[in-house]
Amino acid sequence: MTEATPTPAAPAGVANQSDHGWRPAIEVSHRARMEIFGAVLLALLLGALDQTIVGTALPTIVTDLHGNDLYTWVVTIYLLTSTISVPFYGKLSDIYGRKPMLIIGIVIFLIGSALSGLSQTMEQLILFRGIQGLGAGALFPVSLAVIGDLFSPQERGKYQGLFGAVFGVSALVGPALGGFITDTWSWHWIFYVNIPVGIVSLYFIIRLLPTVKRVGATRTFDLLGAAVFIIAVVPFLVGLTNAQSGGWTDPTVGGFIIFGIAAFLVFLAIESRAKEPIVPLDLWRERTYAGSIVATFFAAFGFFTATVFLPRFYQVVLGESATMSGYALFPLLIGVIGSSIISGQIISRTGKYKVLIIVSVAFLIVGSYLFTGMTATTSQLVISAWMLVLGIGIGPTLAAFTIVVQNAVPFTKLGVATSNLTFFRQIGGVVGLSIGGTIFGNVLRDQVPVQLAAAGVPPQVVAGFQGSAFDPNSLVGVGGNLGQSILASVPAQARPIVEPLVPQIVDAIYRAITLAIADTFWLGVIGGVLAFLAVLVIRELPLRSATRIPAKAADEEATEALVADLPLDFA
């Protein structure tokens, strides 16, 4: 066992200090560092994939478990528990260390995965998905914080670019992988596949990852703040989820959202007086931190819009399978992965990030704007080019902001700062999808009669596709025969009139769906512009060449750390 000296961290803003008298935050061999990095990358992949892989299998799950009325809760409960737990894990990792929090998170996630695969009823599946989400809340923020412990801000770009790529891969490949596993084996295996991957990750984390704790940190946890935070976030997220199928004036939508916002204001008041706040408000005084959080929130609009509505275009309008739609999104995937990795390398080598982020957000705006002009006749080559542009814009936002935030805060608050970034990215995605779903539904409802009339469908038939009784979303299903669905919804006496018009009606509805999807990308444009403005206020702080302090630092509370449970040195 090789002893490593406890190493405090440099205060925010310290840059390129001389190595004389300074030591790295975690001093392990290069081989051990890389093995830890690979294990943490696997942990992040677990959580990222599970957010996207389940969606494709849901229709089969609902059929097997006879739970159509509880359909949305399979996704909602996971979203709730994973989002709510994120700030708690971040705060606890600053107090007790990353290692125990990451191990706890992975174990809970794997238990939830195994139980979800064994579910025999929808109620069981919902309960077990909630458990799975409680574990997943640790995977994102703590994994990213571990990288902050292992590498200096100047080094992190090389590695966090891969983390950004994981987000992109999971969002684009997840649905296709979920469809493949469900079709090849069964839906149970979309949960079981997590177990061997998680065990490998756990093995290396337990064996190699040191525990980094704050010396002198109080073990007092803000229980009142935690309770109010849960009371605020649960109704807010449920309201946003309900907004995708109901009106914003509905009490379960607007009422829940307003209640959540009011409770969140109470939470902020509590945090301003707490000795150990879950969300330290003083971090928001640093404009680089605040600007990065706000930019991440709004950039998520474009990312989530693309990853949700583009697959719908391929699967519904073009009739592709989930697997083939994943292949069709390959240009977007190339853009996300390539730009994420390259941006990390550029930041690492140059120490500059502001111009790079500004350029990437500009690509996000342009890419989203290009898709607002998409029609059912737009060539696939053109759409692929648009996806590449959009992917180039999305990639750096998934990696660069983590580097910026971790470089802007004291080491003692790295975990909570990283968890806040993750939390606001997830909340931004939910808000964006809720607004995007509303835009999609409204535009589709308006465009269906317009496109039917343009296709030469008689007015008396067009009238049947209008009015409050007509729900266009009922026609937007993946798979199946749209023509047969239309005939089935028409009264028997009208079928002889409608049947010859079915090809025209189908084409018109597909055009309407495409236009509705195109209009959702205006959300990406608006979000991109707001993110762009937020980036402008960021200060370009020099990247610290190491997470280090002089041996006789005066400010112990802000800088001290303890390294324990050191791994074997494989050098």
Image (cartoon, rainbow, N blue to C red):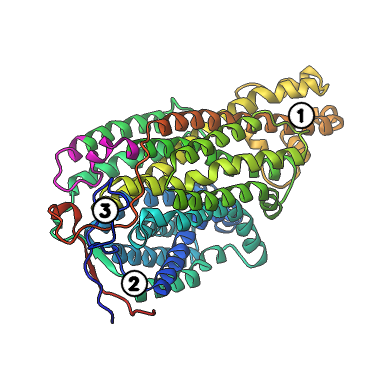
Q: Nearer the viewer, mark 1 or mark 2?
A: 2
The quarter of the picture where residue 204 lies is bottom left
- Marks 1/2: CA distance? 63 Å
Residue drawn at x 18%, y 59% is: 560
Which region of the structure is painted magenta? Answer: 269-289
Give the residue type at disc 2: Val
| Residue located beneath label 3 in the image | 411
Residue drawn at x 45%, y 35% is: 298
| Residue located beneath label 2 in the image | 28
- Who comes first in sequence, dot 1 or dot 3? 3
Residue 61 picture location, percent across and down = 57, 57
Q: Nearer the viewer, residue 8 or 190?
A: 8
Which quadrant, please, contains the N terminus?
Answer: bottom left
Cβ–Cβ below 8 Å for labels 1 and 3?
no
How would you rate the neighbour count of disc 2 (Cα within 10 Å): few for under 14, some for 14-19, many for 20 or more?
many
Give the residue type at disc 3: Phe
